[in-house]
Image (tube, helix red, strand yellow):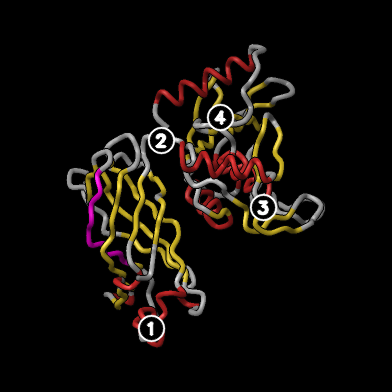
Amino acid sequence: MNDQIKDEVIQRVEQFLAGGNLERNRFDLKKKWYRFNDLNNKQVSFKNEFWKDICAMANSYGAEDGFIVIGVDESAKTLHETKIEDSGLNQSQIKDLVLSNIDRPISIDIEYLTIKGTQLSVIHIPISINKPHLVSEYTNPSGDRSQNVIFIRTGSGTHIAGRGEIDTMYWERNNIQVEKRFECSFNKRDMTFRGGQNGSIIFSAPFSFENIGSRRLSILTVSLTIVAPLFPSFQKMTFKTQLRSQSTPWAKLEVGELESKSLVLNHKLALREEEARMVTSLDNMKNELEFKNLVVQLVNGEEIFGKLSTPFI
Protein backbone atom coordinates (compact mmCIF):
# COMPACT_ATOMS: atom_id res chain seq x y z
CA MET A 1 0.00 0.00 0.00
CA ASN A 2 1.24 3.48 -0.75
CA ASP A 3 1.10 6.30 1.80
CA GLN A 4 -2.11 7.74 0.35
CA ILE A 5 -3.94 4.44 0.81
CA LYS A 6 -2.57 4.02 4.34
CA ASP A 7 -3.75 7.51 5.27
CA GLU A 8 -7.21 6.72 3.88
CA VAL A 9 -7.49 3.55 5.97
CA ILE A 10 -6.34 5.34 9.13
CA GLN A 11 -8.84 8.15 8.53
CA ARG A 12 -11.74 5.73 8.06
CA VAL A 13 -10.91 3.78 11.23
CA GLU A 14 -10.54 6.96 13.27
CA GLN A 15 -13.87 8.27 11.95
CA PHE A 16 -15.53 5.01 12.95
CA LEU A 17 -14.04 5.14 16.46
CA ALA A 18 -15.34 8.71 16.80
CA GLY A 19 -18.88 7.57 16.05
CA GLY A 20 -19.00 7.80 12.26
CA ASN A 21 -20.42 5.25 9.82
CA LEU A 22 -18.46 3.04 7.45
CA GLU A 23 -19.06 2.36 3.77
CA ARG A 24 -19.01 -1.40 4.23
CA ASN A 25 -18.92 -3.05 0.77
CA ARG A 26 -15.15 -2.91 0.72
CA PHE A 27 -14.22 -2.24 4.33
CA ASP A 28 -14.42 -4.76 7.15
CA LEU A 29 -13.27 -4.73 10.77
CA LYS A 30 -12.19 -7.72 12.84
CA LYS A 31 -11.01 -7.91 16.43
CA LYS A 32 -8.63 -10.87 15.90
CA TRP A 33 -6.74 -12.61 13.12
CA TYR A 34 -8.20 -15.63 11.36
CA ARG A 35 -6.90 -18.76 13.14
CA PHE A 36 -5.90 -20.70 10.04
CA ASN A 37 -4.77 -23.83 11.89
CA ASP A 38 -7.82 -24.08 14.17
CA LEU A 39 -11.15 -25.91 13.74
CA ASN A 40 -14.60 -24.99 15.05
CA ASN A 41 -16.81 -27.36 17.04
CA LYS A 42 -17.91 -28.99 13.76
CA GLN A 43 -14.25 -29.63 12.81
CA VAL A 44 -14.43 -27.03 10.03
CA SER A 45 -11.27 -25.04 9.32
CA PHE A 46 -11.41 -21.27 9.78
CA LYS A 47 -9.63 -21.04 6.43
CA ASN A 48 -13.11 -21.21 4.89
CA GLU A 49 -14.16 -17.94 6.52
CA PHE A 50 -11.02 -16.29 5.13
CA TRP A 51 -11.61 -17.59 1.59
CA LYS A 52 -15.24 -16.42 1.73
CA ASP A 53 -14.30 -12.93 2.93
CA ILE A 54 -11.52 -12.37 0.38
CA CYS A 55 -13.61 -13.70 -2.50
CA ALA A 56 -16.66 -11.62 -1.51
CA MET A 57 -14.72 -8.39 -1.21
CA ALA A 58 -12.94 -8.88 -4.55
CA ASN A 59 -16.34 -9.50 -6.21
CA SER A 60 -18.03 -6.45 -4.67
CA TYR A 61 -19.34 -3.63 -6.83
CA GLY A 62 -17.28 -0.62 -7.80
CA ALA A 63 -13.78 0.45 -8.77
CA GLU A 64 -12.40 0.68 -5.24
CA ASP A 65 -9.82 -1.25 -3.25
CA GLY A 66 -10.98 -3.45 -0.36
CA PHE A 67 -9.61 -3.61 3.18
CA ILE A 68 -9.93 -5.96 6.13
CA VAL A 69 -8.60 -4.19 9.22
CA ILE A 70 -7.69 -6.59 12.02
CA GLY A 71 -7.47 -5.33 15.59
CA VAL A 72 -10.70 -3.30 15.85
CA ASP A 73 -13.50 -4.48 18.13
CA GLU A 74 -16.53 -3.18 16.26
CA SER A 75 -18.95 -3.52 19.16
CA ALA A 76 -16.81 -1.89 21.85
CA LYS A 77 -15.05 0.46 19.41
CA THR A 78 -11.66 -0.41 20.91
CA LEU A 79 -8.28 -1.20 19.37
CA HIS A 80 -6.23 -4.34 20.00
CA GLU A 81 -2.61 -5.07 19.09
CA THR A 82 -2.28 -7.67 16.30
CA LYS A 83 0.50 -9.26 14.29
CA ILE A 84 0.43 -11.57 11.28
CA GLU A 85 1.89 -14.46 13.27
CA ASP A 86 -1.32 -14.54 15.36
CA SER A 87 -2.87 -16.36 12.40
CA GLY A 88 -0.42 -19.28 12.61
CA LEU A 89 1.01 -18.47 9.16
CA ASN A 90 3.44 -15.93 7.71
CA GLN A 91 2.60 -13.41 5.00
CA SER A 92 3.86 -15.57 2.14
CA GLN A 93 1.84 -18.56 3.34
CA ILE A 94 -1.31 -16.44 3.61
CA LYS A 95 -0.88 -15.25 0.02
CA ASP A 96 -0.39 -18.86 -1.10
CA LEU A 97 -3.55 -19.79 0.81
CA VAL A 98 -5.54 -17.30 -1.30
CA LEU A 99 -4.21 -18.78 -4.54
CA SER A 100 -4.77 -22.37 -3.40
CA ASN A 101 -8.58 -22.24 -3.30
CA ILE A 102 -9.84 -19.09 -5.07
CA ASP A 103 -10.25 -19.40 -8.81
CA ARG A 104 -9.10 -16.48 -10.91
CA PRO A 105 -6.18 -15.25 -8.83
CA ILE A 106 -6.49 -12.45 -6.30
CA SER A 107 -3.47 -10.42 -5.26
CA ILE A 108 -3.47 -9.29 -1.64
CA ASP A 109 -1.05 -7.27 0.47
CA ILE A 110 -0.74 -7.38 4.25
CA GLU A 111 0.75 -4.47 6.16
CA TYR A 112 0.76 -2.90 9.60
CA LEU A 113 -0.73 0.46 10.55
CA THR A 114 -0.45 2.20 13.91
CA ILE A 115 -3.48 4.07 15.22
CA LYS A 116 -3.41 5.69 18.66
CA GLY A 117 -0.26 3.76 19.49
CA THR A 118 -1.80 0.36 18.62
CA GLN A 119 -0.46 -1.83 15.80
CA LEU A 120 -3.21 -3.12 13.50
CA SER A 121 -2.97 -5.55 10.59
CA VAL A 122 -4.51 -4.60 7.25
CA ILE A 123 -5.32 -6.99 4.39
CA HIS A 124 -5.47 -4.94 1.18
CA ILE A 125 -7.50 -6.37 -1.73
CA PRO A 126 -6.90 -4.23 -4.85
CA ILE A 127 -9.55 -3.65 -7.52
CA SER A 128 -10.11 -6.89 -9.40
CA ILE A 129 -10.27 -7.15 -13.17
CA ASN A 130 -10.88 -10.91 -13.01
CA LYS A 131 -14.40 -11.04 -11.57
CA PRO A 132 -16.21 -13.23 -10.80
CA HIS A 133 -13.94 -15.05 -8.36
CA LEU A 134 -15.09 -18.29 -6.77
CA VAL A 135 -14.10 -20.47 -3.83
CA SER A 136 -13.27 -23.84 -5.37
CA GLU A 137 -13.98 -25.93 -2.26
CA TYR A 138 -16.04 -24.37 0.55
CA THR A 139 -17.30 -25.83 3.83
CA ASN A 140 -19.74 -23.72 5.85
CA PRO A 141 -19.58 -23.54 9.67
CA SER A 142 -22.13 -26.40 9.91
CA GLY A 143 -19.93 -28.71 7.84
CA ASP A 144 -21.91 -28.59 4.58
CA ARG A 145 -19.62 -28.69 1.54
CA SER A 146 -20.00 -26.87 -1.78
CA GLN A 147 -17.87 -26.35 -4.88
CA ASN A 148 -17.26 -23.27 -7.03
CA VAL A 149 -19.14 -20.82 -4.81
CA ILE A 150 -19.28 -17.15 -5.84
CA PHE A 151 -19.59 -14.86 -2.80
CA ILE A 152 -20.29 -11.13 -2.85
CA ARG A 153 -20.28 -8.51 -0.10
CA THR A 154 -23.07 -5.94 0.11
CA GLY A 155 -23.07 -3.54 3.03
CA SER A 156 -21.73 -5.42 6.05
CA GLY A 157 -23.03 -8.82 4.90
CA THR A 158 -21.76 -11.57 2.62
CA HIS A 159 -23.92 -13.94 0.57
CA ILE A 160 -23.81 -16.22 -2.46
CA ALA A 161 -24.17 -14.10 -5.60
CA GLY A 162 -27.30 -14.30 -7.72
CA ARG A 163 -27.51 -14.27 -11.50
CA GLY A 164 -27.95 -10.50 -11.77
CA GLU A 165 -25.00 -9.87 -9.45
CA ILE A 166 -22.80 -12.21 -11.50
CA ASP A 167 -23.82 -10.41 -14.70
CA THR A 168 -22.74 -7.13 -13.08
CA MET A 169 -19.36 -8.67 -12.21
CA TYR A 170 -18.78 -9.56 -15.87
CA TRP A 171 -19.78 -6.05 -16.93
CA GLU A 172 -17.35 -4.49 -14.46
CA ARG A 173 -14.63 -6.90 -15.53
CA ASN A 174 -14.78 -5.52 -19.05
CA ASN A 175 -15.44 -1.87 -18.26
CA ILE A 176 -13.61 -0.82 -15.11
CA GLN A 177 -10.46 1.16 -15.92
CA VAL A 178 -7.55 0.51 -13.58
CA GLU A 179 -4.06 1.96 -13.51
CA LYS A 180 -2.12 -1.29 -13.83
CA ARG A 181 -3.62 -3.89 -16.09
CA PHE A 182 -2.28 -6.09 -18.87
CA GLU A 183 -3.26 -8.94 -21.14
CA CYS A 184 -0.98 -11.70 -22.35
CA SER A 185 -1.27 -14.44 -24.95
CA PHE A 186 0.78 -17.18 -26.56
CA ASN A 187 0.10 -20.09 -28.91
CA LYS A 188 0.33 -23.48 -27.20
CA ARG A 189 1.72 -24.92 -30.43
CA ASP A 190 4.85 -22.77 -30.09
CA MET A 191 5.75 -23.64 -26.50
CA THR A 192 8.51 -26.08 -25.57
CA PHE A 193 9.77 -27.86 -22.45
CA ARG A 194 13.26 -29.13 -21.74
CA GLY A 195 15.32 -30.25 -18.81
CA GLY A 196 17.59 -27.70 -17.16
CA GLN A 197 20.40 -27.79 -14.65
CA ASN A 198 20.00 -29.56 -11.31
CA GLY A 199 16.83 -31.32 -12.38
CA SER A 200 14.87 -28.17 -13.20
CA ILE A 201 12.39 -27.69 -16.08
CA ILE A 202 12.62 -24.87 -18.60
CA PHE A 203 9.52 -23.62 -20.41
CA SER A 204 9.74 -21.22 -23.36
CA ALA A 205 7.30 -19.60 -25.76
CA PRO A 206 6.85 -16.33 -27.68
CA PHE A 207 4.46 -14.15 -25.65
CA SER A 208 2.50 -11.03 -26.54
CA PHE A 209 2.01 -8.50 -23.74
CA GLU A 210 -0.39 -5.57 -23.98
CA ASN A 211 -0.67 -2.76 -21.44
CA ILE A 212 -4.40 -2.01 -21.22
CA GLY A 213 -4.18 0.05 -18.02
CA SER A 214 -3.68 3.77 -17.61
CA ARG A 215 -0.05 3.75 -16.39
CA ARG A 216 3.30 2.63 -17.75
CA LEU A 217 4.40 -0.85 -16.61
CA SER A 218 8.04 -1.62 -15.79
CA ILE A 219 8.14 -5.39 -15.38
CA LEU A 220 10.93 -6.94 -13.34
CA THR A 221 9.96 -10.64 -13.41
CA VAL A 222 7.22 -12.89 -14.79
CA SER A 223 5.84 -16.10 -13.28
CA LEU A 224 3.30 -18.59 -14.62
CA THR A 225 1.65 -21.60 -12.98
CA ILE A 226 1.09 -24.65 -15.19
CA VAL A 227 -1.01 -27.64 -14.16
CA ALA A 228 -0.44 -31.05 -15.81
CA PRO A 229 -3.23 -33.30 -14.47
CA LEU A 230 -1.87 -36.50 -16.05
CA PHE A 231 1.56 -36.17 -14.45
CA PRO A 232 1.46 -36.44 -10.64
CA SER A 233 5.00 -35.09 -10.32
CA PHE A 234 4.13 -32.02 -12.41
CA GLN A 235 0.60 -31.31 -11.19
CA LYS A 236 1.36 -27.72 -10.24
CA MET A 237 4.52 -26.06 -11.53
CA THR A 238 5.36 -22.38 -11.08
CA PHE A 239 7.82 -21.08 -13.66
CA LYS A 240 9.69 -17.81 -13.18
CA THR A 241 12.04 -15.60 -15.14
CA GLN A 242 15.48 -14.95 -13.75
CA LEU A 243 15.51 -12.16 -11.18
CA ARG A 244 16.87 -8.93 -12.65
CA SER A 245 18.21 -5.67 -11.35
CA GLN A 246 15.62 -2.92 -10.88
CA SER A 247 17.67 -0.78 -13.24
CA THR A 248 17.26 -3.35 -16.05
CA PRO A 249 13.62 -4.54 -16.01
CA TRP A 250 12.51 -7.40 -18.22
CA ALA A 251 10.10 -5.17 -20.14
CA LYS A 252 8.73 -1.63 -20.19
CA LEU A 253 5.27 -1.12 -21.64
CA GLU A 254 3.76 2.28 -22.31
CA VAL A 255 -0.02 2.73 -22.07
CA GLY A 256 -1.64 0.92 -25.01
CA GLU A 257 1.64 -0.65 -26.12
CA LEU A 258 1.71 -4.22 -27.46
CA GLU A 259 5.03 -6.04 -27.37
CA SER A 260 6.05 -9.57 -28.36
CA LYS A 261 8.88 -11.15 -26.42
CA SER A 262 10.38 -14.61 -26.14
CA LEU A 263 9.73 -15.72 -22.58
CA VAL A 264 11.96 -18.31 -20.90
CA LEU A 265 10.76 -19.52 -17.50
CA ASN A 266 12.49 -21.89 -15.09
CA HIS A 267 10.79 -24.27 -12.66
CA LYS A 268 13.31 -25.03 -9.91
CA LEU A 269 12.28 -28.53 -8.88
CA ALA A 270 14.88 -31.25 -8.39
CA LEU A 271 13.53 -34.16 -10.45
CA ARG A 272 14.32 -37.82 -10.07
CA GLU A 273 15.88 -39.43 -13.12
CA GLU A 274 12.66 -41.14 -14.25
CA GLU A 275 10.78 -37.85 -13.87
CA ALA A 276 13.36 -35.95 -15.89
CA ARG A 277 12.79 -38.33 -18.79
CA MET A 278 9.11 -37.38 -18.76
CA VAL A 279 9.74 -33.67 -19.34
CA THR A 280 9.79 -33.97 -23.12
CA SER A 281 6.42 -35.75 -22.91
CA LEU A 282 4.88 -32.45 -21.82
CA ASP A 283 5.36 -31.24 -25.41
CA ASN A 284 3.06 -34.04 -26.59
CA MET A 285 0.18 -33.13 -24.29
CA LYS A 286 0.00 -29.38 -24.84
CA ASN A 287 -3.79 -29.30 -25.08
CA GLU A 288 -4.19 -31.03 -21.69
CA LEU A 289 -2.11 -28.47 -19.81
CA GLU A 290 -3.83 -25.73 -17.80
CA PHE A 291 -2.26 -22.28 -17.54
CA LYS A 292 -3.16 -20.00 -14.64
CA ASN A 293 -1.84 -17.36 -12.26
CA LEU A 294 0.24 -15.28 -14.67
CA VAL A 295 1.91 -12.76 -12.38
CA VAL A 296 4.32 -9.93 -13.09
CA GLN A 297 6.40 -8.21 -10.45
CA LEU A 298 6.94 -4.51 -11.10
CA VAL A 299 10.17 -2.70 -10.28
CA ASN A 300 8.54 -1.22 -7.15
CA GLY A 301 7.93 -4.76 -5.82
CA GLU A 302 4.18 -4.75 -6.53
CA GLU A 303 2.69 -7.91 -8.02
CA ILE A 304 -0.24 -7.82 -10.47
CA PHE A 305 -2.12 -10.60 -12.24
CA GLY A 306 -2.77 -10.54 -15.95
CA LYS A 307 -5.47 -11.91 -18.23
CA LEU A 308 -4.01 -14.89 -20.10
CA SER A 309 -5.11 -16.36 -23.43
CA THR A 310 -3.59 -19.64 -24.70
CA PRO A 311 -5.09 -20.69 -28.04
CA PHE A 312 -3.93 -23.79 -29.94
CA ILE A 313 -3.70 -22.76 -33.58
Above/below status of 152 relative to 187: above
At 27% from the left and 47% from the top, the residue drawn is 219
The residues bearing labels 4 and 1 have C-alpha atoms spaced at a distance of 50 Å
SS of the residue under disc 2: loop
Q: Earlier in the sequence, mark 2 or mark 4?
A: 4
Q: Quadrant of residue 283?
A: bottom left
The image shows residue 27 at horizontal and vertical percentages of 59, 29
* CB contact under 8 Å: marks 3 and 2: no
Q: Amino acid at mark 4?
A: Leu
Which numbered dot is residue 120?
4
Mark 3, other Cα within 10 Å: few <14 / some 14–19 / many ≥20: some
Above/below status of 275 relative to 79: below
Which numbered dot is residue 149?
3
Q: Amino acid at mark 1?
A: Ser
Magenta stretch bounds: 257-266
Horizontal arrangement in the rendering, residue 240 relative to residue 146 (left or right): left
Please state the total of marks drawn on the protein image. 4
Residue 5 in the magenta stretch? The answer is: no
Q: Earlier in the sequence, mark 4 or mark 1?
A: 4
Mark 4, other Cα within 10 Å: few <14 / some 14–19 / many ≥20: many
Q: Earlier in the sequence, mark 1 or mark 3?
A: 3
Above/below status of 262 relative to 284: above
Q: Earlier in the sequence, mark 4 or mark 3?
A: 4
